[in-house]
Image (cartoon, grey):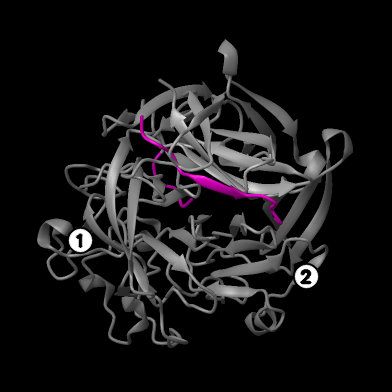
Amino acid sequence: MSPGLLIRIIVPLAVVCASHYNAPARPVSHSPDVQIRHLLNLSGSSPIRIAKDPTTHLLYILKSSGSIYQLNLGEDGNPFTADLVYNASHHGVTGVAGFAIGPDGTFYLVGNASQNNNSQNVVTIRKGVPGPGGGRVWSLLARADPYPRSPSIFNHNANAIIISPDGRHAFVHIGSRTDHGEDQGGHREVGLTTRILRLPADATDLTLPTDRDRLHAAGFLFAEGFRNTFDLAFDARGRLFGTENGPDRDMPEELNWIREGHHYGFPWRMGADDNPQQFPDYDPAQDLLLDPDYNAVQNNYYHNDPSFPPPPMAFTDPVLNVGPDADSFRDSTTGEIADASDLGLTLSTFTAHRSPLGLVFDTLESLNQEYRGDGFVLSWTRGDPDGDSFAGPFKDPSQDLLHLDLSPLGDTNFQARVTRLVGNFSNPIDAEMIGNRIYVLEWGGDQGVWEISLPADPVLRIRHNTSGILHLTLTGETGASYDMETSTDLDAWTFHENLTPVTGIIEIEEPLPAGPSHRFYRAVPSD
């Protein structure tokens, strides 16, 4: 029996870019301590987001129709179900692409609507605050002025949204309208595109101008230089990360540590490589990274482009992948495919065309030492594990869940040891994490919902105390049994209560201890 985290109490306290659709698959674990459970299959319109309510630990699924379903995890032998709770008539958002739930349980939705014969896009962000009787009061947080849509397929629109851990800000990504900065319909990128905005989460009826300088002056512009950051996530220390889907050229997909005022390179730099179209002597016929299977290549969007604008500022490079997985690249001088870590090299960050998304972190630091505090990311696109026989990742199977063991490189960047944990998903599109469980949502196949269990150590934390009541949170293995014990001297421990976190997390309320000036708590696995 090993002790969990000790808590000392002092008294008194003042306290998608798309490619292939696949037939149904069954995920396969690549680690003996990672378990997989199929929960249910969905039906109807495509699922695009899964999110948790931090106040209840319930999961919700957003479908492309705008319908939101509550996921019933089927405890006590009941079947797993997805029950409709809201649809577009409730929240009024069309073209839904982003979904987040704030720390107070408020729902946030991001949508896109085309207008003027599909020539313009309008971004809308709405929120649903919990109301009396269990319903929600929906209101407009922000609406953007219309901006020109691209005549190509590369309208990435507004998609990812996340709420800061303190609940004060909503971070929203608006993707590019081009593949790699080429002219599309008389425009390259415009003021709102390729940006991550930071908006006050309690605002109403904000207007987002299509001018970069006005966005900056209003305090809304947080970071820029993103092609398609389809997912955002905070780590255990409150640092913001985002996944980035790359262009129709064999350039790395990215994981970025996103900081205020930084520019992440698009369209001048992708991965750690320059976009050659910005250079006056560019000849696409000599470009070995252009694959004729891709739309932008077939439509001659890669071309000599003497009016390509100069880079505006210095760029921040992506997280470095030190391997062993998801690090294949095509050599720009030979056209050959190689494995970066096999050659002692790093990649910035993932094999081309993986479409990384579904980014989550162990923010509670409840997993065992191998995974504690680490990140996990999905990849949407099917790859070829043996070569490059079709459009997609080369010499890389993709469609998997990767473990990201991040290490800081001073205060400038991170490197990540990237390991494949689970493979053989069918176009996995989003993930959420509760305790030691990652819930994976599939867009392809039978629209499966899967539960991935990781080994955990019990963690007992103080949340807050009010009116003489101590509020604790126990995080551990879902369904496991733990004994909460108390001590006044860290020597003799007394059994206090048996706990079973059904969802991996259990909230505990305790009267503040009387008598001794302090008391310690710990949680240990039951014998």
Residue 362: numbered disc: none
Residue 207 tag number: 2
Q: Would residue 200 appear left or right of 272 to someone viewing this image?
A: right
Q: Is residue 441 above or below residue 228?
A: above
Instruction: Determine whether, in the image, residue 149 is placed left or right of residue 353.
Output: right
> Eyeballing the image, is 61 above or below 115?
above
Frontmost residue, 109 versus 219: 219
Instruction: For mark 1, give the secondary structure.
Output: strand
> In the image, residue 478 lies at what x, y percent?
49, 28
Quarter of the view holding residue 272: bottom left
Residue depicted at 52% across the width and 23% down the height: 41
Residue 64 on image: x %, y %:
62, 41
Q: Is residue 82 above or below residue 430?
A: above
Position of the N terminus, as image quadrant, is top left
The alpha-carbon separation of the residues under discs 1 and 2 comes to 43 Å
Q: Is residue 434 left or right of residue 121?
A: left
Residues at discs 1 and 2 in contact (Cβ within 8 Å): no
Is 10 contained in the magenta span?
yes
Give the extent of the magenta segment: 1-20
Task: State whether residue 338 appears in this view.
Answer: no
Query: Label 2 amino acid?
Result: Thr
Residue at 24% in and 71% down: 285
Of the residues shown, which amino acid type is indicated by label 1? Arg
Q: Residue tagged by mark 1?
A: 330
Crowd around label 1: few <14 · some 14–19 · many ≥20 (10 Å): many
Packing grade of label 2 (10 A; few <14, some 14-19, many >=20) is few
- Quarter assignment of residue 456: top left
Chief SS of the magenta region: loop
Q: Looking at the image, which is closer to me, 70 or 183?
A: 70
Q: Nearer the viewer, residue 321 or 374?
A: 374
